[in-house]
Amino acid sequence: MNRDDFFNLLCANQWSNAACMGYAIKACKALNYSEKEISEFVITLNAMFSNFTPEEAEEEYRND
């Protein structure tokens, strides 16, 4: 899945925080993050879900 495919999935309302978390954890594992690093990342990502709207997250994504 490329970046545009990822964005299209987000826009198609076929997305959930759980799916996002799963992709993020898979990425962490692919980068050989330790279990502690993954745990810290999950805690931080959950905070992002609580503190920012999907629109704010999309803006961050588009500005990257």
Image: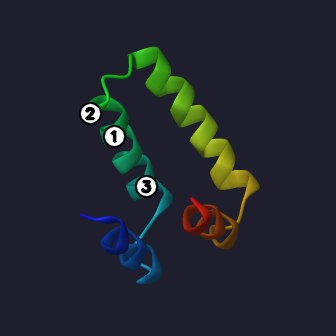
Asked if residue 28 is positioned above or below residue 1 in the image, the reply reads above
Label ID, residue 27: 1
- Which element carries disc 1, helix, strand or loop? helix
Read off the residue under disc 3.
20
Read off the residue under disc 2.
30
State yes or no: discs 1 and 2 in contact (Cβ < 8 Å): yes
Seen at 41% across and 83% down, the residue is 12
Marks 3 and 2, how far apart in space? 15 Å
Q: Residue 59 placed where, x, y %? A: 65, 69
Q: Residue 9 placed where, x, y %? A: 37, 75
Q: Amino acid at mark 1?
A: Ala
Which image quarter: residue 53? bottom right
Q: Residues within 10 Å of mark 1 (few under 14, many from 20)?
A: few
Asked if residue 10 is positioned above or below residue 28 in the image, the reply reads below
Asked if residue 48 is positioned above or below residue 35 in the image, the reply reads below
Tag count in the figure? 3
Residue that extends furthest to the front in the rendered view of this protein: 64
In the displayed structure, does residue 35 sit left or right of residue 2? Answer: right
